[in-house]
Amino acid sequence: MTDWIQFPAPTPAIVAPPSEESATDVRLWLLVIAALVFAMVVVGGATRLTESGLSITEWKPITGVLPPLSEAQWSAAFEDYKKIPQYREMFPNMDLAQFKTIFAWEWSHRLLGRIIGFAFAVPLAWFWLRGRLPKAVKPKLIGILALGALQGGVGWWMVSSGLVNRVEVAQERLAIHLLLAAFIFAACLWVAGGLGYGTRIIVASGRRRLSFFANLLLFLVLAQIGAGALVAGLRAGYAYNTWPLMDDSFVPPTDELLRLSPWWSNLVDNVALVQFDHRMIAYVIFALSLFHLIDAAGTAGGRAARGAGLLFGHVSAQVVLGITTLLLVVPLWAGLAHQALAMGVLAVATLHARRLHAAQAEAEED
């Protein structure tokens, strides 16, 4: 009797494709990953400063998740450590309790690396399968995932350099390891900085120049992190513990800076030149960040100027902390704070450069 009444058939809900503006959950996830990488770098710094990095002499990506669980396993791990030059030449009187302490630092560092890999890969697959990733973001995330996988191999390549004929890891490999971590950290922040509403800024004038100097500062901060790793690997912070002079000179004599042959080996093997380079890059970053602040305040104002001010403030604090670390001959707390603040400077530099890059790109599209 009622089949003459026609009800409209239900239609599927219209779901808009994911966009960079709507991907706030992806943004939050990437910020969490960046925070984990930050923690990884700090733990890595503690591992280095406590001479713990060579305490695990094997690379076991799967079974290495578990530490020794019995006294027999602890004794076996300690015996493996006794076979390398670091134990014989630096810590011949170390006992099992002391070994457990340095083992804990290195094991924590490796475990955190595994946690980061899991925390990145699993949500990435979930976002991808659920159609939550903007198309332009997908290749960037795959690139970050590849860098993370590479980092695991680079970490072991670094550790292996200290197991034979050395009492520490090769400083150039340490620099590559830290730089790769810094690049992953910056990449996560760069991608996250372009996601979500309210991430854009408007720059009325001087966009191209401001973006150029922001990008230049980001590059120099990364270069400075690499230079700092060379200083750490060579233990160059324990030499020339005066400021602003190095051995009574602002610029040490050439025969001191270039005493090794071939000349290019001084860039990574000469304590004097490595520390001098680290100082000079710091001065350049300080001067450029001050210039950039003045420029941004005078030509753009608003969020661009505030970002430049925040960057200059972080750079200034890092310079003061670096000088303090040097004058105090690298106490553990200062060394860790210096490395942590370096990542803070990198975070601010990355997000500031990302916002100015977006402002310039939008202006060119218009």
Image (cartoon, rainbow, N blue to C red):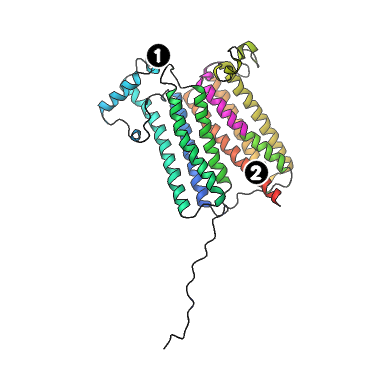
Query: Measured from the top left, where is residue 91 in percent x and y?
Result: 38, 16
Q: Main secondary structure of the magenta part?
A: helix
Task: Tell me the magenta residue range.
Answer: 219-240
Q: Residues within 10 Å of mark 2 (few under 14, many from 20)?
A: many
Image position of 50 (left or right of 210): left
Position of residue 236 relative to residue 178, above or below, is above
> Can residue 337 be seen here?
no
Position of residue 303 relative to residue 52, above or below, is below
Determine the secondary structure under disc 1. Answer: helix
Ranked by sequence position, the earlier of labels 2 and 1 is: 1
The answer to which quarter of the image holds residue 46 is top left
Viewer-side residue, 66 vs 248:
66
Quadrant containing the N terminus is bottom left
Give how far apart the Cα atoms at labels 2 and 1 are. Answer: 51 Å
Query: Measured from the top left, where is residue 174 in percent x and y?
Result: 49, 26
Q: Which residue is mark 2?
A: 357
Q: Residues within 10 Å of mark 1 (few under 14, many from 20)?
A: few
Query: Measured from the top left, where is residue 345 in percent x and y?
Result: 58, 34
Which residue: 66% across, 27% down? 284
Viewer-side residue, 320 vs 285:
285
> Can residue 168 be seen here?
yes
Position of residue 49 relative to residue 344, above or below, is above
Q: Which residue is mark 1?
A: 89
223 within the magenta span: yes
Q: Amino acid at mark 1?
A: Glu
